[in-house]
Image: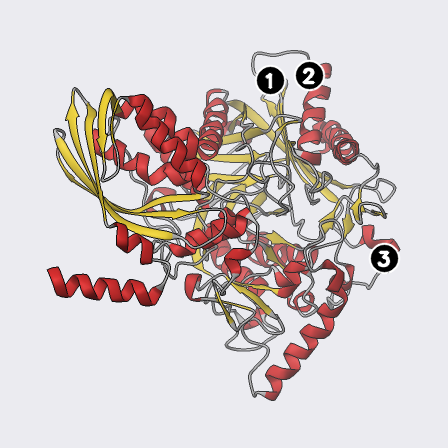
Amino acid sequence: MTGAAIRAGFGKTEITAFEPGMCLFGWGQPENIGVDVAAPLYARALVVECPRTSTRLAYVCADLGYISEHLRQSVLSLLSERGVALGEHEVMLTATHTHSGPNGYSKYLFYRVTGPGFSARVATILACGIVAAIERAIAALTPARLRLSKASIPLTDAVAFNRSLAAYNLNADVEPLSQVRSDEAVDREMVLLRVDQRDGPPLGVLTWFPVHGTSIHRGNQRIHPDNKGVAAVRFEAMAASRFGPRATPFVAIFAQEAAGDVTPNFRWHAARKLMIGRYDDDFASAEFAGGIQAQHAWALFLESEARGEELQGPLRGQISYSDFANITVDPQFAGGQQGRTTSPACLGLGFAYGTLEGPGPLFAARQVNAPLARLTARRRRRRVQDWRTGHGPKLRFFDLGHGGSGSILSVLPALPFGFGLIPDRRVAYYQGALGGRELGDSPWVPQILPLQIFRIGGLSIVGLPIEPTTVSGRRLRAAAMSVLGGQGVRQVVINGYANAYASYMTTFEEYQIQNYEGASTLFGQWTLGAWCTQLRELARAIAVEAPTQQAATQPLGERRRSLPQLVKRSQKMSLQDRVREFYERLSADREQSLSKLEELFAADVRFRDPFRDTVGIAPFRELFVRLLKQYRFVDFTDVVAEGDESAFTLRYDMHLRMVVGPTFVTPMASFFRVRDGKVCELYDYYDFPSGLVSPIPILRKAYKTLINRLFL
């Protein structure tokens, strides 16, 4: 494929959204709630295609903290519904990792608790915005020239520092550095892809540089894209000033690389008791860090016109899924040792210590972390356990991979006695979720994870759903280049925060000290070795260049799907399905669900239960309003519908919990009669005594036994 065969286009859509009162994603602090917007969020897309081979790749970078699997699946579903010719191999979704973006768009409990909750509204806005950016990029496709350049940001610019230097210094392949040289313990190279219309003006730019989106700290309550978003807006303004206004605006994408241990913060603020950036004002620090990235990207962009390496194909995209709860690591990536494997997801106690820029609840006790890790390793050796397997020296804090059957600190159940007395709405949400039966032993974080490679000529973009540390990124690049280097690839980018999210990844050496990043390496000390093993396998598949059409129905290396197969929803749902969806989404949407009542229920709807008999939509709505105000947690699970369009029944369990206290689970049945396409009568029937005794296992069991003997 020649350079003349490549077409490219950029698209950009605003995706600003948040759920008022829900915590922003990233810091995990109760005061970090969303109140208003300081600066808009965007999804920016680059689409490249080769008409001759019918290959098309869509790369998206969104001003978000992470990409959830639910969000990716929603985007793929919308693309399918709209007839856009892009499948899961051809779409890579990435995030800038801002810590001042929305929460509430993951279905996994560990991430839902940080909000707490799931917001269908936020998830929908994000998915629709990302799809719109892709569609705009497709509409803008034009013959293009792609040129690749790279250069390092000098140490004189205070933009990136290693926040976990003690762990970094444990690596055998680095020079140990003192704290004053932490800015040398990062990869300061910026990679830039310049895209110009063939024989025409520039269209846009895509850059990669590793630095956390943490210029703005946990005290913030305003939506903001942090330093990466600032860099993109500044670069776009410079391009508009130089090249003038156009029908298709210039788009600048500032993406992440291996930023797991890289921070923009380098000054200790005594009053705030955390590390901050160049200025005391966080927003000014975000402008400073973003400005440095934009400035150096602009210089590299200008140089690339004459010195950039032109990319001339081939175009390839491939994704695979692997169960990281149990992956056998190739001995090459395990120090020559046989039989090393990953383990089900688990957080270490070091997670609760946090970092210097984001102290956790146990931050004051962080100095005991390393001695505890060493003690844990010694105890396991004395017990004749091979401490080199599984989670190694990690002091197990939360078993996330075993769901409700997991433990806390290895001895406490997932829901300890008295836990619900803690006056925290996240604790209340957690208790309510565990009180329901729908979770079971399902993991609270994704364990079947995607790994993706985009190849554009001499450039390969590796999309990973994790935060690799600096040295982890170097070793991943080496693993990819060991295969792709012989196939004409000269640059590998390790793009974290892609397609899903499963926390951090350290090297084996860094893991031993169990700092925040090591404690947050969920699948154990051989996680990096597992990713290198899987990456090399996928790189070999890319090198073979099997036709995408054959691989699309059964992705390479995919033993199981991380999510169910895409199902295209019919254009018109039945009233029965819409009512069922209303009940199922009430716990997530809460008061916002009530806006749909008039679409489902007649103005003169009659509602009856053992205590009430009302007529009219107003008193019916008031019942829901009072329910949501009285109970902190309201959920309807195991909803089963029976009937037709004239009358139907829903059977389900209703879960109710106040601010403190247990969750009450009541079996219910609701009968609906329909007139003119809306519900005109609703009768609720429920087992009230069963609900009262549901929080007490002995009484619940005795009640069920009594009912079975008397009536069944």
Q: Residues within 10 Å of mark 3 (few under 14, many from 20)?
A: some
Please indicate, yes or no, whether residue 654 appears anywhere in the rendered image: yes
For disc 1, the marked residue is 249
Label 1 or label 2, whichever comes before in sequence order: 2
Label 2 amino acid? Ala
Tell whether label 2 touches label 1 (CB within 8 Å).
yes
Q: Position of residue 456 (x, y in %)?
A: 54, 39
> Residues under labels 3 and 2: Cα distance?
41 Å
Number of numbered tags placed on the structure image: 3
Label 1 amino acid? Pro
Q: Residues within 10 Å of mark 2 (few under 14, many from 20)?
A: some
Q: Position of residue 677 (x, y in %)?
A: 19, 22
- Which is more toward the observer, 127 or 397? 397
Label 3 or label 2, whichever comes before in sequence order: 3
Label 1 or label 3, whichever comes before in sequence order: 3
Is 680 placed above or below 441 here?
above
Is 346 placed above or below 239 here?
below
Please indicate, yes or no, whether residue 501 appears anywhere in the rendered image: no
For disc 3, the marked residue is 179
Disc number at residue 240?
Answer: 2
Q: Residues within 10 Å of mark 1 (few under 14, many from 20)?
A: some
**In screen coordinates, is 320 left or right of 608?**
right
Of the residues tagged 3 and 2, which is closer to the observer? 3
- Which is more toward the observer, 536 or 297? 297
Q: Secondary structure at mark 1?
A: loop
Tell whether label 2 touches label 3 (CB within 8 Å).
no
